[in-house]
Amino acid sequence: PSLLRRHALKHIQMKRQRGNMRGEGKGSNSRRPSTMLFLFLRLRAGLQSTHALFVNNGAKIPMNKLLPMVTSRSNGIVYHPQASKVAHAQTSCDYGRASILVNRASGCTRRYNSNIAIETDKSSEREEDDIRVEGVTLSFSTLSKAQLTLPRHPHNADVNSVLKRTEDMLRSMCKSTALQEEIERESLAAETSISPLEMENEETLGEKVFANSYVDLGKITTIGFDFDYTLVTYSTELLSLIYDMALERLVEEKQYPVEMIDALKGKFDEFFSIRGLAVDKDTGWICHLSYTHKVAVAWEGREKVSSDRLMEEYSGKRSLRPNERRKRLKPLNDLFSMAECCLIADTIQFFKDRSIPFFPRSCTEDILSAIGRTHISGDFHRLVASNPEKYFEPKPHLVSVLNSLKASGKKLIFVSNSPFWYVQAGMNHVMGPDWRETWDAVIVSAGKPSFYTDKARPFREVSTNTGRIKFKKVDRLEPGEVYTQGCLRELIKCGDWSTQGVSPANELQSQTNAGYAGYSLASPSVLYVGDSLFADLVDAKREFGWTTAAVTPEVGYELELQSKAKYVLTQQIIDLLTQTLRQVQYFFGNQQRTADDTKLMNQLEEIVSIWRDEQTEMSGNAFGSVFRARFQPSLFAHSLRRYCDLYMSGVDSLRHYSPQHRFYPEDARLLGHEIKRSRPECWDFDDI
């Protein structure tokens, strides 16, 4: 404890010497309180939309209460001189952690973790470890006894020895000096210059392009892009708009209670759902599936379904047979589906709260139909197109990315399911009125995924002046013009996809690609970039062998979360407890387990579950990570690995790479025995 306190004081002294911590003004004789709190925040775009300040145990301060408290801001530091902390006499840490939940595009959640250095006044002691800011009390660095106290075996001394050492290590890890130094390093990272080649730092890791397989961009001759959530991204106002419009359709067209308008309109909750979920139409449950199709987490309305109910509903194995899955589960895979996920949950909760009888399948199908009609009607498209500044997010790097790819000799194809007038509004906003000049082919209302599988649907030209379809035969796609409908086979026939004029770096590969199915578009030399796995990417991969890249904005948010000390600590504790379970079984041997043995294992597994819940809560939503269903890879992550060669948080990420860059997968191993371990099954705890 004294070392940590000296470390904190030294850090504060260094800051003062550099002029970052000043008094209320030059020449001021006023003294600071000896007990104070400093919040080191990386000030980034979006702070004004911050939702709340979260602390370790889940307590939170609304930002509308926090921001007025800020009295000065300098060099990325937010400082509030009135904040005070009264430390417990036995506290072993003068550092804490907090994080800010920031409302990001497409309803996704992003956490900005802050680092808190505290200069304590040892003359003041209280039983609780609190921070008090103008009447608001926060508890932090307090973990429940159940999380840090391990059970004991009534008879096995060897097992108890392992448990005692693990317990000591748990407490030591929570108070570790190394973690506090990591926190300080993060707080100072914004002030140090970092090489642009160092892609593993916090600022650039979220913009890294990740590879599931080997991809050589130098061999790519044609790149296609989707529109929604790929070339353009949306503010959360769009999902709220879709939610409200579908709600009105439920009331007006399906005769749902009119009270729902007052109760639910404007109540879309961007922090409830994630994509990659599924709704069970027979129960109305929103389910998060693992890669083995097991239901890891389910919510009925806004209430979490218990494990016992999951086991009962899904035949004791938390999963359905393949034919049952096809009948009961409706995937909610894209970012638009977050609105219908939230509306399903809120509608069911509305009925439950008022004891209104309802049939889950009818309710679910009505909501899915209302959402579908909202999309087809074009109502929300017209509102978005009329106010692009409100709904479209700026894309400052998009033009430079596309120009770089074009200059390298690659052909660019625009393929969207959206109508031309809507695409025109979005692309004018993010690229300017000359956006069509960038593309070798522009296709709207394409009808993906049928666009990939139809065999003879012809293209029709769209007038760029009136938006009306021209009645003329289309034999060739001209750059700068706009086409609708069609299919991939027609695209191959109507376009000039030869590799003439490509850059010298691509000439050799152009000759290699010439033999692919007779057409350069039916080959891995085509890269398609989109956000929807099953509408954009799966058939392109399966039918034509295209190289595919998924836009997954969640990867940026989750990488930032996973780089923070609290998440790292939680994951280390889960790994430690899991390895402890293995070592305990080693001491049990291969004999029949006694009732005491089984009880101990169950208790340890419950503690692991508590820590997993702690980790899930850090994600800021009800389901946890998009890529993890509890402790297993999610079905979404499995599909991402199976059907996508590359994935990235956004198209802007490509600006960090040459058009001839070669991507190497991090690790293609899937089976447990292929993972290298530094130790055998049982760890030597002294070496951890």
Image (spheres, rainbow, N blue to C red):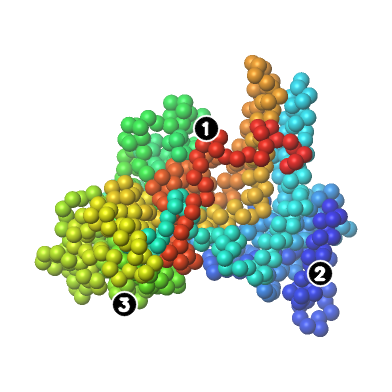
Can residue 395 be seen from the camera position used here? yes
Q: Name which residue lies at 28% across and 47% down.
A: 543
Tag in front: 2 or 3: 3
Q: Where does label 1 land, which residue?
A: 307
Residue lying at the far left of the rendered structure: 472
Q: Where does label 2 land, which residue?
A: 13
SS of the residue under disc 3: loop
Q: Quadrant location of the C terminus?
A: top right
- Placement of 649 over or under 643, stated as above or below: below
Q: Name which residue lies at 74% across and 55% down.
A: 180
Instruction: Give the mark, 2 or 1, whose residue is nearer the N terminus.
Output: 2
Q: In the image, what residue type sits under mark 3?
A: Asp
Q: CA distance from mark 2 to mark 1?
A: 52 Å
How many numbered circles does the render carry?
3
- Placement of 478 over or under 620, stated as above or below: below
Q: Are marks 2 and 1 in contact (CB under 8 Å)?
A: no
> Residue 554 location, x and y as percent?
49, 55
SS of the residue under disc 1: helix
> Residue 602 location, x and y as percent?
63, 28
Q: Locate residue 506 relative to residue 59 in the image: left or right.
A: left
